[in-house]
Image (spheres, rainbow, N blue to C red):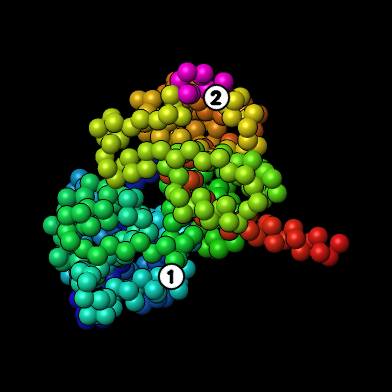
Amino acid sequence: MQVGTVGAVILAGPHGATPQEQVVGRALRASVLDLVAVLTGAGFGPVIVAGPDLDWLPEQGGVIRDMDAAPFHFGERLAGLIATYDLARVVYFGAGSAPLLSRSAIGAIRAGLLEPAGERGADLPGRVVLTNNLHSSDWIGIGDARDALPVIRQAARDNSLAWMLQQGGAFDVRVLADVRPAAGMDLDTPADLALVRKHADCPPNLAQALADPLLDRIPVEPVVAVAARDGGRLAVIGRVSPLAWHTLSSASQCWIRVFSEERGMVASERIDRGEVRSLVGRMLALVGPEGFFRELGQIVDAAIIDSRVLMAASGHYPGDADRFASDLFLADAIADPWVRAFTGAAAEAPIPVLLGGHGVVAGGLHALADIVAARRRAGQGADQES
């Protein structure tokens, strides 16, 4: 690889056949197209897109298609691409990991990876790593990719990689909080899509893909209305990011009740070992889903819930089809009886409920803060005119 260059790898995975999985799949592919355009425009090269099916990716200069040829293992696949294309410095992205990451932010990542080691300070390791989240990385830039290969090969999933590099590889891992909220927004679930399509910076290919009536089932607008209203009462439950909570609190004048638990359950692999525990889940079990939402409706006007913590704690953690159907309130399409009952109760709750994964209480809160701030500015402007 030439001196002064930074490569990029985007891993685009397979998607299921159900309508709820397909709407996410189309959005992820559109997001890849937008990301490729930004990366090539910012001077990254080569840009490599890897996956099991890449027929949807247009032929264009500077972009390499690399089809999966073996059973997928995240670390082995990423390490193999770094070695094959001799990438000394590289930024890895999941297909939906950077929908709101601007050209200037991506340029800052590139500059950070090209920064000479001597300028980082004598007290810092020379091997710099940049990411959006130490405990659950969605994208990650590695300044000395060859040295990182032994650690990368061990990573079963991207969420764990930044943490593994810091703990086991003696890398200087830096979380780029200054480019949020964009750096924290990841597209994993239908709820993430419904939030991003209301954001002013939603890029063109993605915006087109999100014009899907299926996403209208998600009550984003009522939740935004509560968060934007002076004195509105909002509950945020799950793996809540403290920074995201603070950002939303600063952008709004609503009262926010937060219950944060089981952060890092995926990166630490507690979910794989069946070790997830939830106090909210315990209450849910005691009073039942209808009783839980009835009680919640007595103290708040809307709720945003990372339902994956509750699913994992209950022992009912289904595949994408059921989880995405739950986010879309398609209860009849859910096979798991616990998830179906929980979803049905959420749909009938006396308040609007936004269900999703980690994204809705992390990067999604940053995006919501932007949406709320714009809504409040517009409202204040209208008040002044009147």
> Is residue 40 left or right of 83 when viewed as pictured?
right
Residue extending farthest to the front is 123
Residue drawn at point x = 28 percent, y = 70 percent:
7
Residue type, label 2: Phe
Q: CA distance from mark 2 to mark 1?
A: 41 Å
Residue drawn at point x = 79 percent, y = 61 percent: 382
Residue 325 vs residue 176, the one in the foreground: 176
**Are dots 2 and 1 in contact, CB under 8 Å?**
no
Res. 220 in view: yes
Residue of label 1: 105
Kindly identify which residue carries mark 2.
292
Q: Which residues are magenta?
A: 283-292
Residue 297 percent coordinates (x, y) = 63, 30
Q: 10 Å neighbourhood of mark 1: few (<14), some, or many (≥20)?
A: some
* Identity of the residue furthest to the right in this view: 386
Determine the residue positioned at 55% across, 32% down.
329
Q: Nearer the viewer, residue 215 or 287?
A: 287
Quarter of the figure with residue 144: bottom left
Q: Is residue 284 magenta?
A: yes
Q: Position of residue 126 (x, y in %)?
A: 20, 72
- Asked if one can make out residue 347 in the rendered structure from this viewpoint, the answer is no
In which quadrant of the rendered view does residue 176 lie?
Answer: bottom left
**Label 1 residue SS:** helix
In the depicted view, which residue is nearer to us: 253 or 385? 253
Kindly identify the residue that appears in the image at 27 percent across and 56 percent down.
162
Secondary structure of the magenta portion, mostly? helix
